Image (cartoon, grey):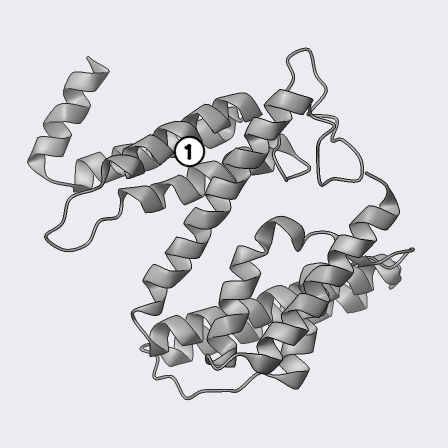
Amino acid sequence: MGLSFFALISVFIIILFLILILFTKEDKNVFFIKFILLAFPFIHINAIPGKFHASTFDVIVLLFFFLFYKRKKVQWENRTIYLILFILLAVSTIIGCVTAEHFNLDTLESLMRFVSLFIFAKVITDECANDANLSSTVMSCFKAGLVFSLVFLALQLKFGVQFSLAKSLNENVLTDNTRYSSFFQDPQKYAQYLAAISFFYLIKKANGKLPLMNYLMLFLAIIGIFLAGGRAALGGWCLGLAFIIMLGKSAYRVIGILSCL
């Protein structure tokens, strides 16, 4: 896949976002969140070629912020604490820029990524606080991304690790034992992604049971972690599951102990 192919994907995603957000009847903040989460496999692609690398995510976030963002009043508990933390983060960032040995394109690129991530985090936290039902929609979008990653992983098993959205293969991919990274460049990041998102399949509605499909997706995610060779991610997943078992119902604790034995 050549560089022009990646550029076309980036341009297509950005244009698609602009067209859809212009004509959507949905709240534009909510639409922005859903679009970013559903387009997650492609948003890491650089939209601006050359020395200054601006990803598709950066471009979409900045376009949304300046053209479509609508600030909403959200009542936060412990609002002062969040304000203090933000001020400390902003001050540390400014100090880092001022004291940097060279303020060049790399520094500006890192700063832009920080701003983009902050804007997205601000929008999604405010909207989820404003609408409690949005959290389930966000989780559904994350689940859709995990399904896509597993489909992409299956294609890599069929056609090889060269079937990738990365411009160049990470050194962790081509080792003695091939490690699969799906649409990520680094298999370790993919393993961490699977470990984190797979826990959404353990969340059930009140007075409800987990569908069999949830257990199947959880199993496939674990297989994906093994194929990615993510030992740290697997350890983190096991630790997270241990917390769930220990803090859950007593029946879960008994099952967990018996499984260990």
The residue lying at 29 percent from left, 71 percent from top is 132
- Asked if residue 101 lies left or right of residue 86, the reply is right
Comparing 149 with 190, the one in front is 149
Kind of element beneath mark 1: helix
Tell me the residue that label 1 is attached to: 236
- Locate residue 141, reporting x and y percent: 44, 55
- Locate residue 177, reporting x and y percent: 64, 13
Quadrant where the C terminus is found in the figure: top left
Residue 204 visible within the image: yes
Quadrant where the N terminus is found in the figure: top right
The residue lying at 58 percent from left, 38 percent from top is 189
Q: Amino acid at mark 1?
A: Gly
Residue 131, compared with residue 96, is above or below; it is: below
- Locate residue 78, reporting x and y percent: 34, 76
* Crowding at mark 1 (Cα within 10 Å: few <14, some 14-19, many 20+): some
- Locate residue 252, reporting x and y percent: 14, 32
- Image quadrant of residue 234? top left
Residue 55 visible within the image: no
